[in-house]
Amino acid sequence: MTEPALIEIKGVTHAYQTATGPLPVLDNLNVSVPEGTFTAVVGPSGCGKSTLTKLIAGLLRPDRGEVWLHGERVKSPRKTVGMAFQNPVLLEWRTILDNVILPLEIVAPRMPKKDRIKRAEELLALVGLEGFEDKRPSELSGGMRQRASLCRSLVHKPDVLILDEPFGALDAFTREDLWQTMHELRRQEPFTSLLITHDLRESVYLADEVIVLSGRPATTQFVLDVDLPGERALDVLYQPKAVDYLATLRHQIQIAQGRATQEEAAQ
Amino acid sequence: MNSTLYKVGVPLAAAILFLLFWEWLVWVNGWPNYKMASPSDLVPAFWKYRLLFIENGWQTLWRTVVGLLLAVIAGTALGMVMGFSKLMRDALYPLLVGFNAIPKATVVPILALMFVGEHNLNTILIAFMISFFPIAVSVSIGLSTLEPEYRDILRSLGASRVTIFWKIALPKTLPEFFGALKVAVTLAFIGTNLMEIVSPHGRGLGSLFDSGKISADYPLMFAVLLALAFLGIVLYYIVVLLEKIFAGWAERAPG
Ligand SMILES: Nc1ncnc2c1ncn2[C@@H]1O[C@H](COP(=O)(O)OP(=O)(O)OP(=O)(O)O)[C@@H](O)[C@H]1O
Ligand SMILES: [Mg+2]
């Protein structure tokens, strides 16, 4: 057999304990993301996507099932993971540069300050934030903050990048800009990524594989292999193949939302 | 340069206008000194007792500051305990509120009896007791309302709780802490003076006020009030300065 995938989720079931009793969120979920690939996860709102990211990051322990990273069972958070959230959560009391450096202070406390700064500056330049290093987060626009947050998630060269709708709150142009930045970043320093999104175009443009989750409690409902060139320009989305993908995904989402059935999809 | 002029000039002008208005009010009504002394009567009072003012002012100041420092230490510690543990929060909050609701004027004689003659200790204790509540509450609320996402940034990298506290929770709580400290400063002053006025043979501006009362020296009494206000302003702005240094980031540019 080939070597195991970098991210391996095996039969994970999870429920939150709430005031009104347990709320099942994930139900026997299986996902595997091979090394170096980019997987997108889409699904109805509230189905458990953010919960999935917390399980992979080791912030939560599943009730049942196992999460493996790099052939090791995840029991607690690990330094080789990078995370970016829908809300950029930058620290207001730090400059943009110091915000980006933050993970290095934890992961590589002995790294010389000069090298840290150099690394952060390189990333900031890559996402077009050159010249904003000494600004405070409140002085940046939403899209710029999101770029900075992306740099922070990558600064320690994680081998797993978990993105929870990081582009969700942005306008369409900024979003498309950042999609291209993602491709650029991936070309420069390869990583394995799991992206949560509710934008189907985003999933097709960025991912090698798109997983559609069912409504809560979520399980894998459909998997789409995106057979497009690795380096993509935006107009790839207007090719017939991509249009087909989008139509398929759209339909699967409707099924997940309970608005259509598999039989209709087959027609 | 213009902005410093503005910053000093505007409040100074307001203070001068206030004193003029006071002077005018006393003059128009023809109030005698025992009813209301006017600012022009205070100048001789200040001059006559200048050494007493300096000595007692210092007494009041250092006791207030020590009481306040104790309140900061104890309040922050208690706030941390309550901020991090829901159990502790649920257990201690009612107690704390009840404690704060007790009028401190009633505690003054109790303390004075408890530590007879320990005048410094008594005074510091009252200043401490009256001022630590806002600090404890602000720290506990600041810590307990920290958005989980902020914690997750570092937790997802395997950072320890201590690291998360130093790098995230503490700085994020600082603006609230300084807000509470501003309230605590004035409260601590009230505490110090309560004790100084009540204690026999006391020291500090409170006792100077008391001796003015006994000898029916009304301008002296008003002069003490003015001196207290002045010290209060000085301490308050020291806190503002510290806030600017340590939590200046929380201040948004106007507009
Ligand atoms: N800490 C929690 N305690 C209790 N219930 C929770 C908790 N976090 C999430 N939930 C519930 O679990 C369900 C899944 O939440 P989750 O955040 O994983 O959804 P999501 O798929 O990311 O949604 P969205 O697309 O809106 O971001 C929701 O119904 C939510 O109310
Ligand atoms: Mg979510």
Image: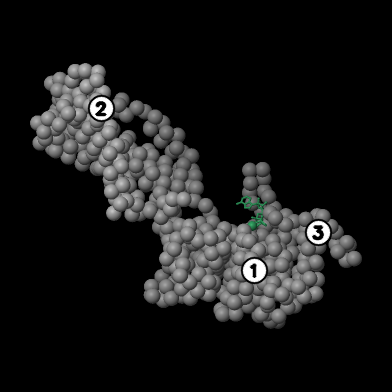
The residue that label 3 is drawn on is A255
Give the Cα distance between marks 2 and 3: 78 Å
Helix, strand or loop for disc 2: helix
The percent coordinates of residue B126 (x first, y second) are: 28, 34
Give the Cα distance between marks 3 and 1: 27 Å
The residue that label 1 is drawn on is A176
Q: Can residue B197 be seen in this view?
A: no
Task: Confirm whether circles 3 and 1 share one chain.
Answer: yes
Q: Can residue A160 be seen in this view?
A: yes
- The residue under the point 27% across, 33% down is B17
Task: Confirm whether circles 2 and 3 share one chain.
Answer: no
Helix, strand or loop for disc 1: helix
Report the amino acid beneath label 2: Trp
Instruction: Indicate which label's residue lies in the foreground, 3 or 1.
Output: 1
Task: State the image quarter where residue A21 is shown.
Answer: top right
Please state if B250 lies on the left or on the right of B73 as rendered. right
Mark 1 nearby-residue class (10 Å; few <14, some 14–19, many ≥20) = some
Mark 2 nearby-residue class (10 Å; few <14, some 14–19, many ≥20) = some
In this rendering, the answer to whether A183 lies above or below B173 is below
Helix, strand or loop for disc 3: helix
In this rendering, the answer to whether A13 lies above or below B72 is below
Pick out the residue farthest to the right. Answer: A267
- The residue under the point 43% across, 38% down is B92
The percent coordinates of residue B217 (x first, y second) are: 14, 23
- The residue under the point 62% across, 73% down is A180
Mark 3 nearby-residue class (10 Å; few <14, some 14–19, many ≥20) = some
The label on residue B22 is 2
